Image (cartoon, grey):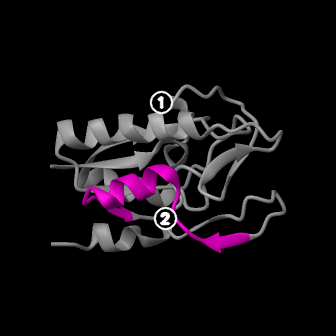
């Protein structure tokens, strides 16, 4: 079976900034077709759960208190890339809108709930390294592949 990365929060792990998860039952359909490796770049990078929410602003990741936490996000992304390289992973299902895992959209960096087109830190690194990235809303493409 092919190995795929999946955002740990989508699998029900309580790793979100607020200590909760984004479990989505649709993710279960991947388990018959893929070996799943759960990832959370923010946790891998050394951030605790729960943690102050962060957003990307002018290329840096800033938490709601104004602290620059870019280094944590970059470190976590590089740890995920190490997994990709070691396990020869070609695909990932990531949590859209996250400053780490955003595939199509991220928050605008003003903490006002406004979404903009963009990639999270980890999603960007994975894409630059040839990993196909998907959101939970796009998993039908993965399930129905031959």
The residue that label 1 is drawn on is: 44
Residue at the location (57% across, 49% down)?
Answer: 23
Q: Position of residue 118 (x, y in %)?
A: 55, 68
Of 64 and 30, which appears nearest the observer?
Answer: 64
The count of marks equals 2
Vertical order, 23 against 112 (above or below): above
Q: Position of residue 39 (x, y in %)?
A: 43, 39
**Residue 127 lies in magenta, yes or no?**
yes
- State which quadrant residue 9 falls in: top right
**Residue 77 lies in magenta, yes or no?**
no
The residue that label 2 is drawn on is: 103
- State which quadrant residue 68 falls in: top right
Of 102 and 78, which appears nearest the observer?
Answer: 78
Vertical order, 37 against 10 (above or below): above
Image-based side of 130 in relation to 100, left or right: left
Q: Which residues are magenta?
A: 115-133
Whether residue 40 is visible: no
Question: What secondary structure is marked by label 2?
Answer: loop
Q: Looking at the image, do the residues carrying marks 1 and 2 touch, with CB atoms under 8 Å apart? A: no
Vertical order, 27 against 143 (above or below): above
């Amino acid at each position: 079976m092919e190995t795929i990365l999946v955002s740990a929060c989508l699998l029900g792990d309580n790793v979100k900034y607020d200590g909760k998860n984004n479990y989505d039952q649709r993710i279960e359909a991947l388990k018959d077709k893929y070996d799943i490796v759960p990832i959370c770049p923010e946790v891998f990078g050394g951030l605790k759960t729960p943690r102050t929410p962060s957003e990307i602003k002018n290329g840096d990741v800033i938490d709601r208190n104004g602290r620059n936490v870019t280094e944590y996000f970059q470190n976590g992304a590089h740890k995920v890339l190490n997994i990709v390289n070691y396990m020869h992973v070609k695909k990932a299902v990531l949590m859209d809108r996250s400053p780490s895992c955003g595939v199509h959209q991220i928050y605008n960096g003003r903490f006002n709930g406004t979404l903009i087109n963009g990639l999270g830190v980890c999603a960007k690194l994975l894409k630059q390294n040839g990993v196909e990235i998907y959101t939970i809303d796009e998993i039908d493409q993965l399930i129905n592949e031959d």
